[in-house]
Amino acid sequence: MHNLEALKKHLYRDNKVKNVKFFPGQSRDATPDDMARELIKFFADPSNGDAEPDEEVAACRA
Amino acid sequence: MAFKDLYNAVQEIDGRVKTGALTVLAIEHSDIKHVIEMWSGQIDPDALRGSYIEGPLGPPVVLGEHEALIALSREMCTAKPHGRYWRRLVYTKELMHVFDTEEEKSDTEAKFDLQIQKFADPTLEMTPQFRSEAKAVWRAMMVLCQEERRQEFVAKIASGDITLDYIAAAIHFPLPYIHYLLQENYTEITAHLVEG
């Protein structure tokens, strides 16, 4: 459960987020800790702070 | 802050509803003033397809009050042949959380714990936070397929003129979710969700 604890620390103790929701993955075996792990990995990715818009994302919204 | 306003606005859109337009309308009709969409190569779609996070949040992704992040699995979004369909559903489902009521928001660790644990344990108590997860999926369907168009699909499926694959391709929607649009009690369920 260490991923879940780390995610809660980041979201609620280090920050004060107002709402968090999830769309689970395709594996029925994935646990809440597995879901938390993916967000921990996301937050650890230094490229997430990039100011440049993602062209692929923009194209998909049009 | 009313989903009903977004729902009514969508009924006036001709053709396929685009997520860019949905985002503009959702911001117009909710308390959230900015939505950032990010695709992450770090998120494994086997475990998690996407997530909605409402600020304030510090680096690396900085969110202020009334700002939201929708983080999606890049692998899911770019998968062939239907990654774009999945992205439309998952992004829109997460976008619908801009309409969560104060009671439905997971704004404490305790509420968050019950919400995320219920994904794996159906015996846990139903909470407003978990219920809003299901509501958001239905609301995503309601705004990605206008009601008039949905009724046309229902009629044509009944007469054998089209297939589920045809509908999926017409509205860019994942095939496993098409049957919800055709459910007999669809209008009954969605009538509740329009209002609250």
Image: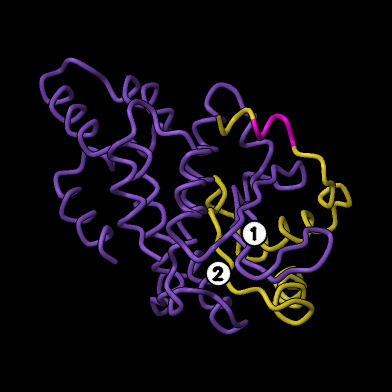
Chain colours: A yellow, B purple
Q: Which residue appears at 63% of the width and 44% of the height? A: B45
Lateral position of residue B31 relative to residue B123, left or right: right
In this picture, is A9 found above or below B186? Answer: below
Q: Which residue is mark 2?
A: B116
In this picture, is A27 found above or below B133? Answer: above
Q: Amino acid at mark 2?
A: Ile
In this picture, is B134 found above or below B150? Answer: below
Lateral position of residue B56 relative to residue B18, left or right: right
Q: How would you classify the magenta stretch by its main secondary structure? A: helix
Quadrant position of the N terminus of chain B in the picture: bottom left
Q: How many marks?
A: 2
The magenta segment: A54-58
Circle 2 sits in a helix, a strand or a loop, which is it? helix
Q: Position of residue B148 (x, y in %)?
A: 20, 34
Q: Position of residue A21 (x, y in %)?
A: 55, 63
Q: Which mark is residue A6?
A: none
Q: Which residue appears at 50% of the width and 53% of the height? A: B95
